[in-house]
Amino acid sequence: MISIQNLSKVYRTKTIETTALNNINLNVPKGEFLSIMGPSGCGKSTLLNIMGLLDEPTSGKVEIDGQSMPNYNSKSVARFRNKQLGFIFQSFHLIPDLNILDNVELPLLYAKVNRKERKRLSEEALESVGLRNRMQHFPGQLSGGQKQRVAIARAIVGKPQIVLADEPTGNLDSSMGNEVMDILLRLNQVLETTIVMVTHDANMAKKTDRLIRLYDGTQIQ
């Protein structure tokens, strides 16, 4: 589902060159739940962003579902990203002035899904994370765990083949973190969604199919 070959990412200024990723080779088969661990600044989020077509590698090749991405800024890549990929972030990234239903509908709005179908799919996604009764609430009225469940609903509302999660339990206490992790595991096991998760929590990583580690931009495991 995801194939990365000889991937490197270098950030350059006039005076400094920083290697964020160095010669990464990784294959993620369909239906796998993969964890990525490593110290802060080791390149985990950079790798996730490249997998999500949000950032472009300096060198190397990235294929998603057998398709290579020659131009990350093209409209076709944006459409592909919207249809095939779902994103979950540590800080939720919900829009405070929109209610929960409208927040979840956003990816479908960009995909030009009609209003009736957007509402149906969004209600279905919120039902799957146990928040159907909160649809008219606003993000400020929810707990951290509930906000993350909304973020998961938004990520899966378009039924993507791949979900990329950057520290999805990082801002939650252990109880809420376990609830969110259970939702991700169910998503992976029942719907066979491929999930790649960046985490600092070894206990969460142990629940996934496979773990890789990065150190100073290099894959060490």
Image (cartoon, rainbow, N blue to C red):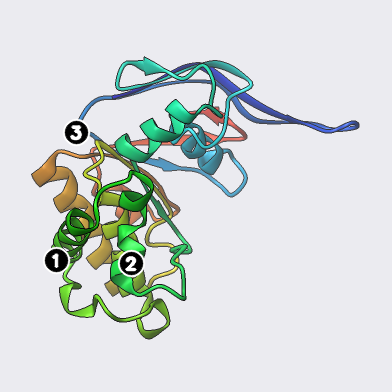
Three-letter amino acid code of the residue under disc 2: Asp
The residues bearing labels 3 and 1 have C-alpha atoms spaced at a distance of 22 Å
Mark nearer the N terminus (3 vs 2): 3
Mark 2 — residue?
A: 102
Residue 150 location (% of width, % of height): 30, 66
At 14% from the left and 38% from the top, the residue drawn is 192
Mark 3 — residue?
A: 31
> Is 205 rendered above or below residue 51?
below
At 23% from the left and 38% from the top, the residue drawn is 209
Mark 1 — residue?
A: 127
Mark nearer the N terminus (3 vs 1): 3
Q: Secondary structure at mark 3?
A: loop
Three-letter amino acid code of the residue under disc 1: Glu
Q: Secondary structure at mark 2?
A: helix
Residue 141 location (% of width, % of height): 37, 85
Dot 2 and dot 1 residues touching (CB under 8 Å): no
How many residues crowd around disc 2 within 10 Å: few (fewer than 14), some, or many (20 or more)? many
How many residues crowd around disc 3 within 10 Å: few (fewer than 14), some, or many (20 or more)? some
Relative to 164, 43 lies left or right = right
